[in-house]
Image (cartoon, coloured by chain):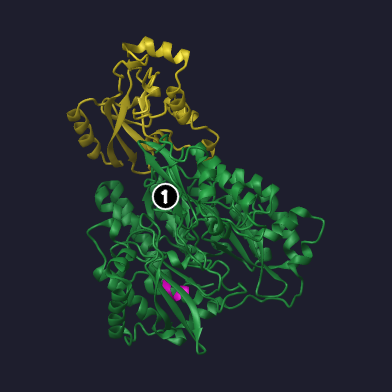
Chain colours: A green, B yellow
Amino acid sequence: MYRYDEHDRRLVRERALQFRDQVRRRISGELTEDEFRPLRLQNGLYLQLQAYMLRIAIPYGLLSTAQLRKLAHIARTYDKGYGHFTTRQNIQFNWPELTDVPSILDELASVEMHAIQTSGNCVRNITSDPFAGAARDELVDPRPLCELLRQWSTFHPEFAFLPRKFKIAVTAAERDRAAIAVHDIGLRIVRRDGALGVELWVGGGQGRTPMLAEKIRDFVPLRDLLSYCEAVLRTYNEDGRRDNKYKARIKVLVKETGVDEFRRRVEAEHARIKDDPALVLDEGELARISKHFVEPPYEARTERIDALALGKDRALARWLKSDVLPHKKPGYAIVQLSLKNADLPPGDVTHEQMDAIAELADRYAFGHVVVTHRQNLVLRDVRIVDLPALHAALVPLGLATPNVGRPSDVIACPGLDYCDLANARSIPVAMQIQERLMKLEAEHEVGELTVNVSGCINACGHHHVGNVGVLGIDKQGEEFYQVMLGGSSSEAPALGKVLGRALSPTEVVDGVERVVATYLRLRHDEEETFLAALARLGHDPFKEALYGAHPTSTRAA
Amino acid sequence: MVTMVSSGYERAPWSPGKWGRDGSRGEAWVKAQRPTARGLRAAAGACTTIITFPIGQLWIVPEPMSKPTLHSVVTANRLREGTVIYVAPGPRWTERFDEAELFAAAEAADAALAWAKGEREVCGVYLLDVGVEASGDKKLPQRERLRAAGAVRVLERLHLTAAELPRKIARPT
């Protein structure tokens, strides 16, 4: 993985030092809250409902075990003993005290981490395929490009005050595990005539106006990658709306100007800057970064996952089937650790679990852990021969729930339990849905089906792209929930469609269970996915399942 | 036929608390819609007017409902740790919602707000509306109920039902 050079180290240390002084000045009264707010936000520190929240960047979700142990230490020392992995592959601590945050930033800097650009109208953490480097279906390892983009976008002087936040996702695989269609820029690494380049998508996003990205270039050669991204951001920075926060994302600009006109402006800007030596992607630089992402020392092995699954241990077999995936190297597997069990909110990990995961990653996975945008963790390179021992170690930690990619692998944002922006709680609803669906999964082979829960229209829980999406809303001070069906963030992206009136917390839990049960009852066979069944049957049977005999009742309209 | 029976605030479908404080929102509304002997007695007790139409329909017009009166509370977060606090008489800060000063007059609320904004060790100061019922019970939107609950870990809260949550807040321990 990438290691900081002296330049990176200095930048991060200086930033922590600056923030220490800013906090001192805020406490002493030299800075007012209005003056201090943008400063703390630039360091990922939010004030939530009843505590501060520190969001820490995890570039493309990749953590070393030293970093994970440091996060455990921070959770234990400065927080309430746990952290929350987010849908942007970051981690959030929910209870830090303001005066401790400078020390937390120092601790982070000591393991090459920071909270820079995790808030504010700038380029946020670059996200990617959590299986990068190990996936069978990837063209190349996308992480060197992610790292290159991270360095280009970090402290980019021109893009520190964009009209609104900006999110970039990168994939190099056939299956899209990075949700590039719902990012401001989505990059798919492709090969044309033997040369690598990227397919460039712009203007996707969720939030209050969900949109799927538009492809604006089939092929951008690697040489032009930075200059093309720079041209997109310059066009957005220049033309994006600043008069209305809700219309300030690049998706609105692309929509309002039309994709052809937007493309024309980007191309014109690109023509102007593409030979700027500072922006031409130097092969030497890419090679230098790529050296940080060399393959670990794999052994020559031949074991197979399916052979293991034939044993008597049914719990192991179920886990292998749902949480373990084939690796590009024979004899190895990709292991997903489910953070969706009955004990903790989705994405939450205790400090004891973090330490234990670090221990297991050191023993079995070359010392690396990856965060997924579905709020799970991945041990990327595990020898198949080690899987039974790893499973046995994960079970008592509550990290071997056999449900990754299954309905009970529910995504949920922090919601009104923590978040100042939320309208309704996500966690209790998500956990109750999860509990119900676990029962269904125990009885049926449900297959892949995603349930995503957000506590407000900002859509941190990605409800628009859940096969079943749940959105919390506020009606006269009370929590209600809309249900939408048909969303997907895969390579065939789609936005869900709202079924009808919003439901009470109890009704929505029952309703989602009935929707999934209806799918199980009406599907042709186990091969027919929820989305395929929905396309064949239409929304009506599911609407009926959700609302029963009162589809238009005004009870909660 | 009785078209509407309403014997009080909790069952009134148009009131801010819509379906009562006990978490059984929908159920309470359905009950209110269904004329029962008990409901009729309750309604008759609360009614000032009973009108009988020639065709035999009975309309019961409920007494004008005692709507909660709107008060304001000044709230903020402590600067160092973000803890939710309220302005109490004095003025002073308190972490207990039940100790917060209820301002009926806008001028008094604004004065307290100005005092709060001048305090150094706080941030995120704002006025929040509280509905106070004749019984003295205070009505808050869910967001404020959760804030008033204090820094209870989500997991601890999870075991509380929707009905228990506001009660816990009403009697902080």
Position of B31 compared to A337: left or right?
A: left
Amino acid type at mark 1: Met
Q: Residue furthest left?
A: B107
Q: In which image quadrant can residue B63 be found? A: top left
- Residue lying at 60% horizontally and 62% vertically, measured from the top left: A378
Instruction: Give A522 or A471, whichever is nearer the viewer.
Output: A522
Q: In which image quadrant can residue A153 be found? A: bottom left
Q: Residue furthest front?
A: B55
| Rendering coords of residue A471 (x, y %) | 44, 48
| Rendering coords of residue A441 (x, y %) | 66, 49
Residue at mark 1: chain: A
- Residue lying at 23% horizontally and 39% vertically, measured from the top left: B117
Position of B163 compared to A384: left or right?
A: left
Vertical relation: A151 (above or below) A454: below
Instruction: Give A138 or A143, whichever is nearer the viewer.
Output: A138
- Residue lying at 53% horizontally and 46% vertically, measured from the top left: A430
| Rendering coords of residue A517 (x, y %) | 61, 47
Asked if residue B172 can be seen in this view, the reply is: no
Position of A374 compared to A154: left or right?
A: right
Q: Which residue is mark 1?
A: A53
Q: Secondary structure at mark 1?
A: strand
The magenta stretch spans which residues? A146-150
Vertical relation: A167 (above or below) A172: above
Vertical relation: B63 (above or below) A136: above
Look at the magenta stretch and give its main secondary structure.
Answer: helix
Q: How crowded is the residue under tag 1: few (<14 C-alpha within 10 Å), some, or many (20+)?
A: many
